[in-house]
Amino acid sequence: MPVYITADLHLGHEACLSYCARPFRSIAEHDRALVDRWNNRITDVDDVYVLGDFSIGLSARELRRVFGELRGRKHLVVGNHDGAKTLALPWASPPRDILRVTLERTQLFLSHYPTRSWPGMHAGTLHLYGHTHGAIQDTRHSCDIGVDRWAYRPVTLREIREHLATHAGPLEEEIATADERTLRRLAA
């Protein structure tokens, strides 16, 4: 069974509609669409890794209700907007700031924040993150997996690997050793 990864749902966060230019008329429509898109992909036995910013603005009762609607075994890598109510939800594993894990024979470094360098970077470990809402270009080994980039739904590792193979930008090593002229070329 596939593993799913997502980030930056911002359930209940009205300001996210305009800040992130999300195509929904209201936060209620937004939240319903994200729950429906999640449940259209996820079964009760699937693992879903949420890389932060699960919810902002919902009451504890409403947050528990929405959490219970979402299928799958949910794991949280904590984001900057994940407060006590979110941390208190019945996650399948304890919430963490960073997670290093091997899933589907792929080594992953999972964080809410993009990282310029990470353990295993030169050995093929993929870095998946959220937080930036699509503002940072993916590299060949790192990718923003937030809902803003992935049709407002969790994605599989297979989809991520295919994306990185065909659409990603430069290697991290090229960025780290580039002079200013080269950086402008890579950013173009």
Image (cartoon, rainbow, N blue to C red):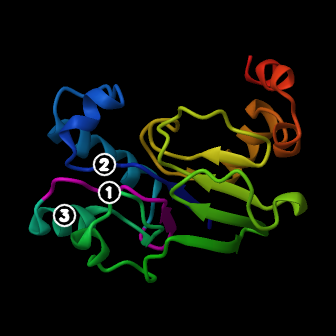
Q: CA distance from mark 3 to mark 1?
A: 14 Å
Q: Is residue 95 left or right of residue 137?
A: left
Q: Nearer the viewer, residue 119 or 179?
A: 179
Which quarter of the rendered picture does the C terminus lie within? Answer: top right
Measuring from the top left, give residue 180's x and y in whole percent. Answer: 81, 25
Query: Is label 2 in a helix, a strand or a loop?
Result: loop
Q: Is residue 128 magenta?
A: no
- Do tag 1 and tag 2 residues touch (Cβ < 8 Å)? yes
In the rendered structure, are the residues bearing label 3 and label 1 in contact, judged by CB atoms less than 8 Å apart?
A: no
Residue at 10 percent of width and 62 percent of height: 59
Classify 86 as above or below 7.
below
Q: CA distance from mark 2 to mark 3?
A: 11 Å
Residue toward you, 92 or 85 = 85
Residue toward you, 2 or 108:
108
Residue to which mark 3 is pinned: 63
Residues shaded magenta: 44-58
